[in-house]
Image (cartoon, rainbow, N blue to C red):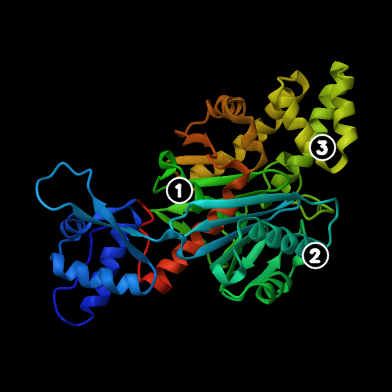
Amino acid sequence: MEQVVAVGTRFMREVNAVAVLRKLRAEASMSVSALAKAVGLSRQAVTRSLNALVAEGLVEFGPLDRDSTRAGRPAQLVRFRAEAGHVLGLSISPQDVRVAVADLAGAVTTADTVQLGAYAGGEQVVETLLSTMERTLRATGITTGDLWFASIGTPGIVDPAAGLIKLIPSMPGLTGDLLLRRLTQALGCPIYLDNDVKLATQAERWRSAEQREDSLVMIHWGERVGAGIVLNGELYRGASNDAGDVGFLDLFTAGPSAPRHPQGLGPFEDRVGGAEIVRQAAAAAGRAGDDALLARIEAVGEHALEAVLDAVDDGSPAALEAIDVVARRFAKGITVIRAILNPRLVVIGGPLARCGERLLTALRRHLADEPLDQPALEVSALQEDAVVHGALLHSLDEIERTRFGLVRNQSS
């Protein structure tokens, strides 16, 4: 994005201060002269902007650059005060709650994850989130007064404008405004609520230079399956913010429709999701006489998927067979996405990203005979932390828009 500066007197100081701040936030520190050259302003104009930013607590002058090799007086260094405020990123899934705190430059200062028990109700989940959040802040000496913005991602269909969870089959106790209402009571900063996969998709493009494609689909693959879609460099939400609910694809049933799953799973995720992976692994273990894997699956109850994924890491033949079975089915979903959207890249996120190259190899093999050229496949760089990083990104973007007057260049 080209740097914008003011050429007239109207809004000159505000616009020039934005130009200076944008450049400083991308650098550890700069000399005043180098900063003036970078933004295309006179040294006097930059100094006026810096003084205004210092008064707001966003910038500070540092020591003279006595290590510089240039002749003459040492340069005056200046830096952005990333520690002037903090943002909060939160995520909730049926398995866990995650909390992360970052400074204004996006550096994570502390994070925590707490596992949820089976069938945790809405109030119980919220209480766990609030206690985890309080403990995480206390560990770093940050108070709610230091937070400038908070964002949270959840499964399901979310209305960000209203702050409502409209449909969340995996955690029905959170339907409605319970989450936003309780967070508003606990925090004194603005709060944003969105679908978890949409936040995760934005995080992948932010944190991973290899995945800053302008045309990609990120598929969260775990107990449930959903996708985030990026077209022409922008996140595509659809008419009701639920574009990418691929878990509801019906690709395998012989009749007119699949029976409704008791846990609210869609037909596609019913055939490729976590419960089916566990079922396939148990069946393969039974055929192979792998009593050790069967015992591991039975011992952990609601965490059986994690046990199967651990077995994949260990190279268990039964677990690898299960992954291959669901990968063949999952490839059918990728072909549908490719036929409609033709993305350059499909990123696999969520718990299944742990399987790494083993999973990608199976998917590529099952896609090899498709008549259309298939997109490149990668696993998530952030894996199960993608949602909370997406929440941090949204918080930073909102600060840039509302407090700094900046707009992030999503393609950079």
- Circle 1 crowding by C-alpha within 10 Å: few under 14, some 14–19, many from 20: many
Give the residue pinned by disc 2. Answer: 122
- Circle 2 crowding by C-alpha within 10 Å: few under 14, some 14–19, many from 20: some
Q: Earlier in the sequence, mark 3 or mark 1?
A: 1
Specify the quadrant of the image occupied by residue 209: top left
Give the residue pinned by disc 3. Answer: 304
Tell me residue 46's x, y (percent): 20, 67
Which residue is nearer to you in this view: 376 or 260? 376
Specify the quadrant of the image occupied by residue 181: bottom right
Which residue is nearer to you in this view: 251 or 126? 126
Label annotation for residue 136: none
Q: Amino acid at mark 3?
A: Ala
- The image shows residue 298, relative to residue 118, as above or below, that is above
Residue 17 visible here:
yes
Q: Secondary structure at mark 2?
A: helix
Q: Amino acid at mark 2?
A: Gly
Q: Amino acid at mark 1?
A: Arg
Give the residue pinned by disc 1. Answer: 205
Q: Earlier in the sequence, mark 2 or mark 3?
A: 2
Q: CA distance from mark 2 to mark 3?
A: 23 Å
Residue pictured at 50% horizontal, 42% vertical: 338
Q: CA distance from mark 1 to mark 2?
A: 31 Å
Tell me residue 22's x, y (percent): 31, 61
